[in-house]
Structures are given as structure tokens and as C-alpha cells.
Amino acid sequence: MNAPAGSDRSLFDIPEDLAYFNCASIGPMPRSAQAEIAAAAERRGRPWTISNVEWMDEVEERRGLFAAVAGTDPEAIALIPSASYGLAVAARNLQAAPGQHILVLADDFPSDVYTWRSFAARKGCEILTVDRPEQGGWTQAILDRLDERVAIVAVPNVHWTDGAFIDLARVGARAREIGAALAVDASQSFGILPVDWDAVRPDFLVTVGYKWLLGPYALGYLYVDEAHRGGEPLEENWLLREGSEDFARLVDYVDAYRPGARRYDVGQRSAFELTRAASASLRLMLGWQAKDLAGRLGAITGRIEAEARRLGLRIGSGPERAPHLIGLELPAGAMEKAAALFRDANVHISFRGRAVRIAPHVYTSESDVERLLGVLARVAEAAG
Ligand SMILES: Cc1ncc(COP(=O)(O)O)c(C=O)c1O
């Protein structure tokens, strides 16, 4: 029997009378990760205690833990600060000819849209924006727009505003058929939705670490397909060269990068203050994944969806929704009143586009859900 939702709450510093449904914005770090930051702060006051363990070993431990959560090889993973950094690496290493198309989704996250707009301007390409489907899901809407003119398909697994699901296996298969590259921003799904690497085969896949992975801000991750592991990094950091663990010989300059995707690691990737905290969160995520995390969160959002429908609220995501994220569309003009009702009830959600975005995680308890549903009833009444 899997653990019920909410049973892991004591691992977090979340008051009982506060319902946090906003990890799609910032995930709470577990207490164990908070403790690692406190210990690391002490170590940083005593730099003579910092050794190759912190410079190198703990970095590789974090890479390995992320790869385990991802279900892939650590050699494929680069340690990066942000989604935009990972996307910049992808843009640096993907090709497109003038006149070709870069496919993006309507209302996608700005770090993605700006990256591909500037890429398109540099290469003389056109941005092809898939409109929010009126009927049916995003997957078919994307497939309908994919033809030989498309050079890069830049899509998420889940739309960040409302949890709408995109079937990356189908999109990836079609991208390969037409010879397009696939660049994925998985920041709103990673850790919850498994990636079927053999079926999706992304060229690059990026995720932040501070949302669903419950890790520190500024420590993110980039998956790099083998075909691109010999590419051009954004910067030439000394730590990314072979043999840089031997500090006495750093001016014996070497051309070779560290193996795998490590050449794309950001400078100062050792991040002494945060690395162990990230690993603590990843360790917990590994355990939760093994206990059907997506199923647990799906049960919560399923209940919210049923109640929202009963109240006459529209589900923003359309027919294909991810299990962990749900967007409810409010009538125009109801936003301000709704914001006050959520605030007064100590229920933390976010507004994205036309949707109230609701994002539970392992700590979400039965009473959190009741609290949220109570507010939804009042919101529906006010909107009605
Ligand atoms: C889909 C998605 N990508 C990326 C980010 C964060 O981007 P960055 O790491 O470039 O700040 C967010 C934050 O909300 C997001 O929702």
C-alpha cells in the first residue's frame, strides 16, 4: 500500500494551518536540505575544512543522484544554474538554416520563448507558435504543425500555466521523422513525470531544481544527448578541464574537457553552500518516486478537478492533463476577489494567465485539500 498524500509533511517546515499549493512557483526545501545549508554555512566560515570532497566528489554525487531520479546515465547530465542557461547551451549547439521554423507553444515560459526568439533572429529563422487548442490536446495541435520546415521543436512536457500535458514520445518520434531537433523544458514536470528516454530521445532537456525537485534555487540540470556531448560550452571554466582536481598543475593548460556532458557545467558548479542540500532533496525524491508519487498527486488533483467541475469552474488544461498540476479558469473580473479569498484562508496558489494554478506535493494533507475546496466554493459563488 502506498503512503497516503500528506504523510510526509513532518519532513517539511510547513505550518498545519497553511495549505501550500504553489510548488510550481517555488518548492519548499525539506528540513534535511535546510539542515545541510546550515551546516554548509558553518563550513564556509572555515574554508580550511573544504577539500576535494566538496570541490569534486559531492558535485559528482549530486550529478549521480539527479541521474538516478531521471532514470538515465550521469554522463548525460550537466550541472547548470537555470533553465535559461541550459536553453542557451542548446541554442549554442543546435543548427537551423535561414527560413526554417522553430516551434514553440503559445504562452510558454519566457526563458524558453526569449531564447528561441533570439536564436531565430540570429539564424534568420521563423518562430512558429502553436496556438492553445480550442478542442483536443496540445499533442495533436503540435503534431499538426510539424513538417520538414521545422528545425527545432521547443516544448515542455507540461504547460507551466495550467498543467496541460504534452506527449513527448509522440512529438519526439515525429521530430525525428522530419529531421528536427527536440529541446525540452521539463521544469514543471521533472521528478513527477518519468521521461521515457528511449522513446522521447530529446537533444537537450532542461529542468530547474527548485520547484518539483524541492532543491535550492540556482542549481538546475541539463540532459544532453550523446550526439551533442562534444559540442561548444557557453564558457571556459577551469574546473571543466581534465585534471583540474590537481590544483598545483592548473597552469599546465589542457585542451581536453571532462567526459560526458560535464563540459556544459556552469562555472563554480561546486556551489559549496548548496550542493549537499540539493543532494538531500534528490535523495528524498528518489524514495517518493518509488512510491508512485504521480499517482498520489493525481488522486489529489483528480478530487480538485471533480469538485471544480461540480462548482461550474472551467478546467484550463483541456482533455490531456498531467497528474500533479491543475489550472482552473476563472471568469474575467473574478481574479481580484479570488486572490483575497485564497489569501484570507491561508491557501497559497498562483495566478498564471487566465488560470488559478494549483500544485500539490508529498506534504499536501487531507485538511489542505479541504481548505482549498472551501475557498473554491466561495470563489465560484463570488464569480457566479
Ligand atoms: C517552465 C519553466 N521553465 C523555467 C522556469 C524558470 O526559468 P529560469 O531557470 O530560466 O529562471 C520556470 C519558472 O517558473 C518555469 O515554469
Image (spheres, helix red, strand yellow):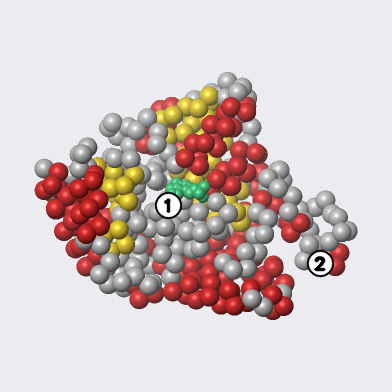
Where residue 247 is drawn, which disc sits there? Answer: 2
Direction from residue 142 to residue 269 in the image, left or right: right
Query: Which image quadrant for residue 272?
Result: bottom right
Dot label at residue 189: 1
Q: Nearer the viewer, residue 200 or 330?
A: 330
Identify the residue at horizontal 28%, vertical 31% (top origin): 134
- Image side of residue 31 versus residue 132, left or right: right
Q: Is residue 81 above or below residue 124?
A: below
Q: Position of residue 62 (x, y in %)?
A: 59, 65
Name the outermost residue toward the top.
99
Q: Give the foreground label among 1 and 2.
A: 2
Q: Is residue 11 visible?
A: yes
**Residue at disc 2, secondary structure:** helix
Q: Which of 246 and 143 is in front in this view?
A: 246
- Earlier along the polypeptide chain: callout 1 or callout 2? 1
Residue 47 on image: x %, y %: 69, 75
Residue at point 25%, 70% (across, down): 17
- Separation of residues labelled 1 and 2 (CA atoms): 39 Å
Quarter of the picture holding the N terminus: bottom left
Element on which disc 1 rests: loop
Number of callouts: 2
The residue at the point 31 percent across, 62 percent down is: 20
